[in-house]
Image (cartoon, rainbow, N blue to C red):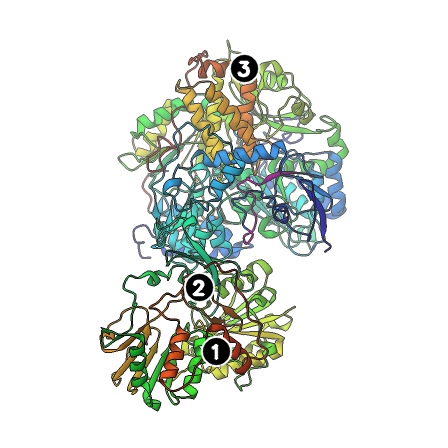
Amino acid sequence: MPDLRGSHGDQPHHILTRWFGTPDLHRLDVYSGKPGGYAALRTAFLEMAPAEITNEVKASGLRGRGGAGFATGTKWSFINRDAPGPKYVVVNADESEPGTSKDRYLLENSPHMLVEGILIAAYAVGANQAWVYIRGEYDEPYRMLHEAIEEARAKGYVGSRPFGKDYPLDIRLYRGHGAYICGEETALLESLEGKRAQPRSRPPFPAVKGAWGRPTLLNNVETLSTVPWIINNGGAAYAKLGTEKSPGTRLMSVSGNVLKPGVYEVELGQTFRHVIMELAGGPPEGRKVKVFWPGGSSAPVLPESMLDTHTDMEALAAAKSMGGSGGVIVMDDKHCIVRAAHRLLRFYAHESCGKCTPCRIGGDWAVRTYERILANEGSQVELDTLQRVSDGLQNGRCLCGLGDSAGWVIDSTLRHFREEYVDHAIRHECNVEAPPAASGRHLPMDREEKTASA
Amino acid sequence: MKSPEKGALSEHVLDEIKELPAKYPQPRSAVMPALDLAQEELGHLTPAAMSEVAATLQLDPGYVEGVATFYSLFHLEPVGKHRFYVCTNLSCALRGANEIVDHVKRSIGVGRSDQVSADGLFSFEEVECLGACEFAPMMRLDHRYHYDLTSEAIDTLIAERKGVGKVKVPSPPRGAINGRSARERAVLDAPGAQGQGEGLKRRQPRKKKADA
Amino acid sequence: MPDVNLTIDGHKITVPAGTLIVEAAKTVGIEIPVFCYHHKLDPVGACRLCLVEFSPGPPRPQTACTTPVSEGMVVRTQSAMAVQARADILEFELANHPLDCPVCDKGGECPLQDFTFRHGYPTSRIDGPRLHFKKPIPLSDKIALDRERCVLCYRCTRYYDEVAWEQELTTDERGVQSFITSQFDQPLQSIFSGNIIDLCPVGALTSRVWRFESRPWDMTHTATVCSKCSVGCSVTLWQRRGQLVRITSHENDEIDEGWICDRGRFDYTDVNDPSRLRAPSILGLKATWADAINAVAGGIKGRGAKLGISLPQDITNEEAFLFRRLLDGPLKGARVKMHGRTAIPAPDAGRAQGSPQNLMRIKEIDDARVIIVVASDLENDVPIVDLRVKKAVSKHGAKLIVVHPEGVDFDRHPGTVHIRNARGTAAAEVRKLASHELLKNPGGPVAILFGDGHGSEDIDELASACGDLAAQVGGKELVLYRATNERGALAAGVAGWDKLDGVQALLCWGPPPTAGIPKSVKFVAAWDHLPRDGYGQAVVLPATTFAERQGSYTNLEGTVQFLRPPIAVRPPLKEGWEVLCELGTALGLRLDYTGVTPIQREMALGTPDLEPAPPPVLVGPAHP
């Protein structure tokens, strides 16, 4: 159906989005019809041993789609199924990475796919209860997921005896309330426990001590939504797609200066040129791609000359970037890189939880330095400061990846667009046409002073 | 039902909050949904409300205050009836979000996010990525997303809430929500109590004026 | 588990398994700077100051405070990366830190100063405006908060949450906007609030009582024993020019583990009161010691039961011993009342309480699997024991049963079983506990702590019930005396409980009775350090305070601890034991001791004491 902004329909690589566009796909009776929903759950529950399920996921080579890209099957195997006491599956639906909307796309189109994946995962790792931590701003997806769970409950898939087997399963929802840091695993767990969401030191890892002190499996929405297909078609079939080390497909949200922004399902290994120029239609008439963020704002940027980089994790690592959340932000040549970097640093400084020194202080220091540069008060000193702050944020200095990401924004834009920085900082000019992005001081220097805007 | 004193919570909200701890493996987890209920009733979190939440959950008010101030969606100052949460992160900024913010500020007559319009109806806030980048520029208003924003769209939304012009169900977003009927996509009541199975529990509705 | 061998900066060491790298480094004198780490709090790895490299291990540096040692580990704290990481983190900490050193009370004992000097960059690259807050904020009338100096190590809020189980101190906002605050800006109420001053590694949390009074290098200090309650925590008393300038904690893992309560920390300003009595007086007129002591002797001699003696809660063992000799001799028959004591008799005083083997020490609370607290509000009566119980519950998983008519602070923990008995029925409830769910299979020692319910319980019944319960469930008892040296006074037999109504002469050793001086009294003799109403009609001897007193206390678990006063007694003041000896002589009893030590020697040999008495404990070095 043409009004979907993203992939849908019958194509060989549409693992997740094949049935999107079907009217009322979010309803259980439709999902269980032609799309064959809940067949995988039945198979897993009634015909497979839990270890087999995990092995199938391992065989698929599926990697976490939240950002870290950790091998999913391996993650499942970290949970000791036989340890006494409750275990939990926690679903990270806190999607807040700038440029990323794929989980929302999944939840609004086919929430049952996620429900099915959760139940299979819970059974595989020995959990009876799953918690979905969903960001507070996702009112509609929350409502739809809630309805889907209730439908599953009415059908008995969620309940005390799914398929007549004595293995109770329950899914509960927990809303976030506006903190990007809750996308980080251990911060999410802290928030789930009703605390300020500050990440924990690891070890211990969530598989050993997670939610409420119990062994916990944490997976992203897209990751779990892929599981039913793997069970239905086999891990080997999934591994045939994509590349050897990054098998399968992933949803890439493409946004920014493109003609057809949307959530596109892409076979890993495709190039970014295909994704940005073909699927998303490229930049508007008369403009060229200048830079793109390949995996959310937290992925180091790549310039236009690297459009032919492949979308698999290895290729991105070789390009000194990362797959991240798969959110592709495209900026054209009419926009200023320094202002863009400033806006992103404002984001990281605003979302910093404040627990560790380098991120808390460094993010804010970087923002203030950008503001001096953009106010034409800069000099070589400011450029050195930016580099120095960036170095101080990376390589294990920070407690979690938020600090590293902030560092990468500075580092990668400086590396690829040094001239623009020099234009601003030394020559006090901006040689890019379009109107400026948001500027002005973002946080008060004096706590008693009221902010210009939050 | 006695009307609540200024800044404090009503009986039925406190009753709902009392039932929350049992829904979680550990009672402290109830603090976020409890604060959400309190904010839904009062519009923002007052010290009295936070103290009542704390007392009901047997926590120190300081703890509740610490949690409330951490999360952006909890407001500790009045925010007006309708708050424009406009995303100005990169993808939206690249498509004109800052101009939208300027238009909102001019139209509702406030300059800063800690201010409320003179009629008490509107306030705004620049927020971070809301996860709908393919519809940029976009925003969240009254518990739903509004996509492909233009100045005209903003004007219409403001007018509806002021009661000027025809009151109508806002048109559903183009795109992603596949094939659902207009009625299904109508504006919903704000989600109420949190926790499992509570998403749509209808509390005693507040006296409603003729708006969405 | 076997010990672990590892190498730190080339030093080969062996430490117990589970030791954190930062602690292992200390064993060879290597300082890894830390802010957020504190050995009594759960490590968090927040400040990132302790980053070190080690192999085998991840390719990135890790925090030494959260990583336990492993066999064959090679740790490098001086590699280029680690050295630079430390300097960078310190630079970040200083980015918003105000240049307050000249006016900051922490100067001279400030880890931020010391670390910057030892590990930081020699020059600053910070050239911009710093973040400002209103300062100082009064967190209570005793503690000031300076948010600009705060490095957000979160030691204070973590201490409050983990150790004290309270959250009136909290962090608001997030990111660089975070700040420490008391809930709704209300003053801190907790009796445990003062420890955050000791914990704070910078000058953000400071004592308002000591504000701007002295620099650390001006003071000398001794480690001694607190005189405010029966727990007997170790404290450090700091003096300058003969004044007691401040009190901080001193770690004694047997009893307090480094925490003290606000009574012990802040109740000392009376020592420096300018109106302190310095000379004896008779009816308001200055007199010599000889005359005054003779006047006292004349007034109390031969009165028998018409003489009342009021003793303070912090009477030393030595003074108590001397009083015993007086009461066995010239003051025979006098009525004695000791301040602040409970109704509980001495242990093993001929009752069916159980043999001394059933009595426990405070530190045995750590290993208890079930803790039962009866008829006592620990938080107010014996605060630091309260913290020890909380630690056993939250960190060692002990179960807690409370028998008390009203709510107590332990109720914050969802696992606490609180039996709200009607007043006076505690003994009956205790007897029922033998069949309680949690005591069927405790899985280890059971600790029974009981007080006297401030007089609301029949103490003999209760003691007997607790003793029987201990025998039934394999438990041990900790008897919660309240007065500082109640146990020592009981052993000496001077912990009197007599009513003083109708006496004609009153000898007050310490402050006068809280109930006031009985109307029947015609003659008052006082040994006190501050002037009070009515002393114009009395014979008054100027007393030493706890900061000058020599002697020993016996705490509630029976440990005898020697005091180490930081301030020497200078004439015209005299020591308490000395005055009692002279009084004895004036009363016709030869009390011939040359010092405290001969008294102690005689006490140890002569007084039939608790059996077996634990050996006396020296508390820290003396630097008078």
Residue at numbered disc 2: C565
Residue at mark 2: chain: C
Residue at mark 1: chain: C
Residue B138 in picture, x, y percent from top left: 45, 28
Residue at numbered disc 1: C426
Q: Which amino acid does label 2 sit on?
A: Pro
Q: Give the range drawn in magenta.
A: C39-53
Element under disc 3: strand
Relative to residue C447, is residue C225 drawn left or right? Answer: left
How packed mark 2 is, by other alpha carbons closer than 10 Å (few <14, some 14-19, many 20 or more), is many
| Cα–Cα gap, marks 2 and 1 | 41 Å
Residue at mark 3: chain: A
| Discs 2, 1: same chain | yes
* C54 vs C497: above or below: above
Q: Which residue is drawn at 54% across and 15% down?
A: A290
Residue C575 in picture, x, y percent from top left: 39, 71
Task: Between label 1 and label 3, give the one nearer the viewer.
Answer: 1
Relative to residue A263, is residue C132 drawn left or right? Answer: left
Determine if residue A96 is in view: no
Quarter containing the C terminus of chain A: top left
Magenta-drawn stretch contains C52 = yes
| Cα–Cα gap, marks 2 and 3 | 75 Å
Q: Which amino acid does label 1 sit on?
A: Ala
Q: Which mark is residue A290?
A: 3
Residue C128 in picture, x, y percent from top left: 40, 28
